[in-house]
Structure formats: structure tokens, C-alpha cells
Image (cartoon, rainbow, N blue to C red):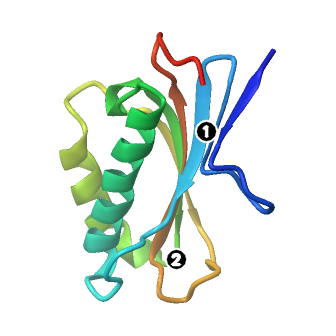
Amino acid sequence: MKIHRINAGQRWSDIVVCNGIAKFVEIPEGDLSGGVKSQVAQVLAQAEKSLAKVGSDKSRLLSVTIYITDFANINGLNEVWDAWFAEGTAPSRACVKVELSNPEWCVEMAFEAAAGEDFAG
């Protein structure tokens, strides 16, 4: 079985696809001063771009692990999260409180999705 690595580097690949399953991680990459809602929106917008690279979209997400630095921010996270999904399309989800490598980040997310039927790598 072939493993496709998109933008592979020494330390990580942007996306890894194997057996029709795409895995990738997104972090906030824009203005970090807007708080958790802004950072979650950034992460989800980046996820849409990553999904498009493998011929997929957010309706094909299977699972998301959310790393959040403060559970006091869970309502803001959920507000943006809930608005992003159409009714009945949310993936399985875990939310874990952590210390992230950049102290300005409020959130980081690891995604698993079904790649598009025509994705050949």
C-alpha cells in the first residue's frame, strides 16, 4: 500500500494519505491576538484548504482531536465549531487540555478524513 506525503519535510509532512485516509494537523497561523474564536476559525479555514488538496471536504471528516490550552475557552471553540458543520456531519471528536509549543496558541487540531475518491497522490 502506497503512502502519499504532501510537502514532506525532515520533521513533518503537511498531509499524509494512506488507504484513502488523510491525516493532518492545523495550528493558528494568522493574527493570534483575536483569542480562541479567531484561532479556531483560522484552523478550520486551513483545514478546508488541506482537505481540498486531497479531493475532500469537511463533510468527509472522520475524527478530530482538539488540543486546547484552557477549558474556559471551550464555549468559544464550540460556537465556531458548531457553525462550521452542517447538521449531522460532525466527526468524532476528542478535546484535550494541553500546553502547546507556542504559548500564544489557544488551540491545535489533528484531523482524519476520507480522501476524495479520485485522489491519486
- Between 71 and 13, the residue placed more toward the observer is 13
**Residue pointed to by mark 1:** 23
Where's the N terminus, which quadrant? top right
Q: Quadrant of residue 21?
A: top right
Residue 50 to residue 77: above or below: above
Residue 32: which numbered mark, if any?
Answer: none
Tell me the SS state at disc 2. loop
Q: Residue furthest top?
A: 117
Q: In the picture shown, does residue 15 fall above or below 28?
A: above
For marks 2 and 1, give the one nearer the viewer: 1
Q: Which residue is mark 2?
A: 69
Residue 32 point in image, percent of width and height: 35, 83
Q: CA distance from mark 2 to mark 1?
A: 22 Å
Say which amino acid is labelled 1. Lys
- The residue shown at (63%, 49%) is 7
Q: Secondary structure at mark 1?
A: strand
Quick check: 117 above or below 2? above
